[in-house]
Amino acid sequence: MIDHHLRKSFQKKVIDPILPNFSKVSPSLLTILALISGILCSIMIVYGFLFWAIFALIISGLFDVLDGSVARLQGCASAKGSVLDITSDRLVEFFIILGLFIRSPEHGLAFFIMLGSVLICITTFLVVGIFIQNEGEKSFHYSPGVIERTEAFILFGLMIVFPSYLVVLTFIFSSLIFLTGFVRLFEFFRLPNR
C-alpha cells in the first residue's frame, strides 16, 4: 500500500532529482545490481553482519526503483526488462528468506509458509495481470496489494534487526501476503464479463 499511495511523491522528491545521474546507465544493469545487493544482504544475514545486511537491503530496493525509472527516461522500457525485473525481485526475496532460514533454522516452518505465501501472491499477480488491460506507466498491468515491495522490505529489515521476534514477523508477513493474493482474486472475480 505504501508503494501505491506514496510512489508518485517518492518518485518526484527522491528519484527524479537523481535520474540524470543514471541517464547513460543500462536499466538491466541496475536490475542486476539490485539482485546482487539482495544476495549480498542474504550473505550478511547468514554471517551476522546486520548493519551491512540492512544497507544491502536498502541499496537493493533503491536499484529496484531506479531500473524502471531509468528505462522510462531512456524510452527503452521493454517486456524483457519487465521479465528480468520481476524475476530479480523474486530472487531477492528468496535469498533473503534463505539467509534468514540459515541464520535461524529452528523456525523452518515459518520460512516455508513465507515462501508459500509469496508463491500464491505472485501467481495471483501474474494470472490476474494476463486478463486485465494495462493502463499504467509500467509495461504490464500492476495490481497493487495490501503489502507491496516497501512493506516487504520493512518487514525483512525488522526480521534482520529483531531476530527474537522472527516468528511473529514472519506470521505478519505471510498473513499480509496471503491477504494481498486473496483480495486480488476477490476484486478480479467481481469485475463484469470475466
Image (tube, rainbow, N blue to C red):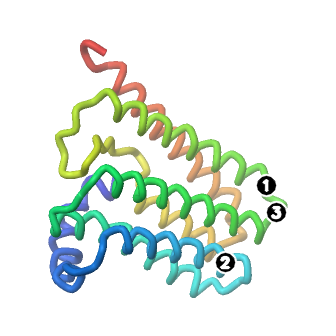
Distance, label 3 to label 1, CA atoms, is 5 Å
**Image depth: mark 2 or mark 1 in front:** 2
Q: Which residue is mark 1?
A: 108
Q: In the image, is 127 to the left or to the right of 112?
A: left
Q: With respect to residue 20, does 156 lie above or below?
A: above
Which residue: 62% across, 68% down? 159
Q: In the rendered structure, which disc, 2 or 1, sits on the residue that comes first in sequence?
A: 2
Q: In the image, is 177 to the left or to the right of 112?
A: left
Amino acid identity at mark 2 = Ile
Q: Which of these two is toward me, 128 or 79?
A: 79
**Image depth: mark 3 or mark 2 in front:** 2
Q: Is residue 10 visible?
A: no
In the rendered image, residue 71, in percent from the top left (x then y), is placed at 23, 65
**Outermost residue to the right:** 106
Which residue: 42% across, 38% down? 126
Residue count near mark 2 (Cα–Cα under 10 Å), binned few <14, some 14–19, many ≥20: many
In the rendered image, residue 86, in percent from the top left (x then y), is placed at 43, 54
Which residue: 28% across, 41% down? 141
Question: At numbered mark 1, what does the secondary structure look like: helix, strand or loop?
Answer: helix
Amino acid identity at mark 3 = Pro
Q: With respect to residue 20, does 135 lie above or below?
A: above
Distance, label 2 to label 1, CA atoms, is 18 Å
Distance, label 3 to label 2, CA atoms, is 15 Å
In the rendered image, residue 106, in percent from the top left (x then y), is placed at 84, 61
Which dot marks residue 43?
A: 2
Q: Which residue is mark 3?
A: 105
Residue count near mark 3 (Cα–Cα under 10 Å), binned few <14, some 14–19, many ≥20: few
The C terminus appears in which quarter of the rendering? top left
Q: With respect to residue 183, does 21 lie above or below?
A: below
> Splitting the image into 4 quarters, where does residue 168 fall?
bottom right
Please say if the residues under marks 3 and 1 sit with CB atoms less than 8 Å apart. yes
In the rendered image, residue 113, in percent from the top left (x then y), is placed at 68, 45
